[in-house]
Amino acid sequence: MVSRSYSNLLELASGDSPSFGRVGRRIPRVMTVAGIMSDIDDDACNSVSSDPPSSIVQERIIIVANMLPIRARRALDNKGWNFSLDKDSLLLQLKDGLGEDAEVIYVGCLKEDIPISEQDEVSQYLLETFKCVAAFISPDLFSRFYHGFCKQQLWPLFHYMLPLSPDLGGRFDRSLWQAYVSVNKIFADKILEVINPEDDFVWVHDYHLMVLPTFLRKRFNRVKLGFFLHSPFPSSEIYRTLPVREEILRALLNSDLIGFHTFDYARHFLSCCGRMLGLSYESKRGYIGLEYYGRTVSIKILPVGIHMGQLQSVLSLPETEAKVSELVEQFRHRTMLLGVDDMDIFKGISLKLLAMEQLLIQHPECRGKVVLVQIANPARGRGKDVKEVQTETFTTAKRINENFGRPGYEPVVLIDKPLQFYERLAYYVVAECCLVTAVRDGMNLIPYEYIICRQSNERLDKILRSSPSTPKKSMLVVSEFIGCSPSLSGAIRVNPWNIDAVADAMDSALVMAEAEKQLRHEKHYRYVSTHDVGYWAHSFLQDLQRNCGEHARRRCWGIGFGLGFRVVALDPNFRKLSVEHIVSAYKRTKNRAILLDYDGTMMPQASINKTPSPNSIDILNSLCRDLSNLVFLVSAKDRTTLGEWFSPCEKLGIAAEHGYFLRLKRESEWETCVPVTDFDWKQIAEPVMKLYTETTDGSTIETKESAVVWHYEDADPDFGSCQAKELLDHLEGVLANEPVSVKRGQNLVEVKPQGVSKGLVADRLLSTMLQRGMVPDFVLCIGDDRSDEDMFEVISKAMVGSTLSPSTEVFACTVGRKPSKAKYYLDDTTEIVRMLQSLASVSDQGPRISPS
């Protein structure tokens, strides 16, 4: 089913109010769902369910990227178009890892602008011939989307360039952001034309489409959706400067699986989620997962690979062999160092040239013998910065050649014209060392291609005058700021900004022993040949399938507006507590147990002043005056504070410090639920906590009669979490022989006597009622955090045991829609208080009709 509460994201992006209404949807051309999809009116619960299961269970993979793997050119007669598959496209290559039977549909743009009059015909042809769904975007909109927001704002920021001035990345332009959202919406509409939401997997690629997951998740709550980011993800200090930072983060979290090339990129993303959204992550059985409104968003860390088959087939071409022969002759008696980079500001070409200059200065013996061939591919972006890079590169190369060149020898050979793929591979085959010294790059597959080319083949070995049995060798000098660097442990890693260090690395690569070069090459070749693009794609889809396994067993709601939309996924039996339902049950019962948490339940967690309001006191007194009720309030606060706050409540039972102290009414003495007389362990725990408090700015220690708590909600999220883990391990070690438990909660680490929990209070409440001859026929238990789950667990066990009868009306309720042992939820403390007010009103009206 499709939600009617579909808000217009484009209006939100432009600052207008969101619009609502029925969302029409035509049957797509490639749709495999039987029947017509109907809209539903979900205003009552604002929930969205996915479409009915299809009768066809075949799984397809819809691969979505900015550009389709298609090459287009006008026919010779200028009538119509000629289309062919782009075999160099990663999207096409990754199909090798999906299996022969996998059905793949591609969604993306064409590089050529297709006139409106031809779009329908082209669209149908691409779908039928190549299984490609073309998203046609007007040139003006595409320019603002791609050259504007993607290349001027996202791309520089993701490569660590802060927009400190209009020349550095450009100021944030909301009109470009609107164009970005608009294009993502167009892509979503195209996916809707072909998707079978119950069966198909959707795999979205790169930063051009980062808000697309929100559009898809809003339409199909259970869509199987993966996203892979091919660029770097910056640290939180950089990313937080983006004005639409939270919108993009929340959109990405509408995916089921998010992939990154390196742990650094994933770590930065997780840090941003923690600092800006307050989310924490866990690693379970090797998988990193973020809990996001009941859904687990998994994080995948795996660098993309190369297409081995394509490389080896191109290496076997006659034109490749001819080019290799030409280069061998051209660089006879000379050692070739090779660089292959796009002409943009992050590839560090000029820094590499300066390092070459430094090498020639420090090592005169290299002059006339060592040549740096720099292949400069055309820049993918455009603008003033690209022109500046070109000018600096040509100027530097010219100066080096003038200073160190001689007749028949140029130390720098700069190739700035586009090369055929086979030509580039020929340079790889001949080069003794490959230099990839970008100052920032998402992945960069140049080193991988170089390694495979250096493995060569029999025909190329003859040209190189090498025996096939001779061990192969290669050398790599790579920047530590590129994505492939961690996977190439045999490469010489450098800081590209340190020109002297890069020059030394170049010299080391030249003079290294042959046996060492061979060992490094063999290590690299084993990795690159086994971790190709097929392996990468198969691994990603396998994890996506695993992570989506629970979709069918979860109940989903869509909440939030615009780009703040997210899906809450919960147990099918978990539902919102109806006030009318509980009031009705309250009226017809006569022995009621009421157990209320305080912080976060009757009082908002974010409230600074935790003192109960007069209204809360009146509600509690009304409930307590009812002779059919036994009411307990549970809190982590100390008994003195609770005693003062609730002194007007004569008959209210209070459990302090998570149930360690307890009293049945105001005039009763405090008693302990756990017999503990020795608190000497505090003398061990407090000094340890004090040490961590001194070294963690923003942390505090709370000392209670029965417990000691270390709070770090005001500390740096990452550092506080790290310190909390260390503190937990430290305390568990020093208190191993003491009768205490050390637990970590929300922004705290607590040490308390063993056995103390809120579950004890629930046990005591039920047993007290039974002692008084009051067999409970109504139980209400409300809480909001992990510690309250102990109460819910006791109530659940009592339902299946002999404590409660099968006819007992039980209402275990948590605050907010989230995974819980409770069966009901209310959205916030306001709704909790309103519900309790309704119950109190019933009690104030006097006795009701007894149950039949």
Image: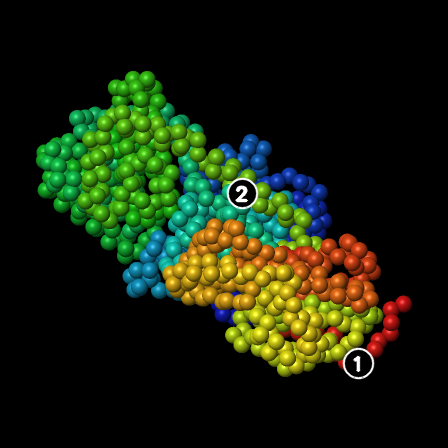
Q: Is residue 788 above or below residue 329?
A: below
Near mark 2 (Cα within 10 A), the count class, few <14, some 14-19 or many ≥20, is few
Near mark 1 (Cα within 10 A), the count class, few <14, some 14-19 or many ≥20, is few
The residue sitting at 58% across, 64% down in the picture is: 560
Q: Nearer the viewer, residue 587 or 661?
A: 661
Image coordinates of residue 59 in percent, x first then y, are 61, 40
| Residue 370 sits in quarter | top left
**Which residue type carries mark 2?**
Arg
The residue sitting at 54% across, 43% down in the picture is: 285
| Residue 846 sits in quarter | bottom right
Image coordinates of residue 162 in percent, x first then y, are 33, 60
The quarter of the rendered structure image containing the C terminus is: bottom right
Which mark is on residue 845?
1
Q: Is residue 160 above or below residue 839?
A: above
Q: Which residue is mark 2?
A: 285
The residue sitting at 43% across, 40% down in the picture is: 304
Question: Mark 1: which secondary structure?
Answer: loop
- For the question of whether residue 589 can be seen, the reply is yes
- For the question of whether residue 344 can be seen, the reply is no
Q: Please indicate whether residue 131 sits to the left or right of residue 31 in the image.
A: left
Image coordinates of residue 791 in percent, x first then y, are 67, 60
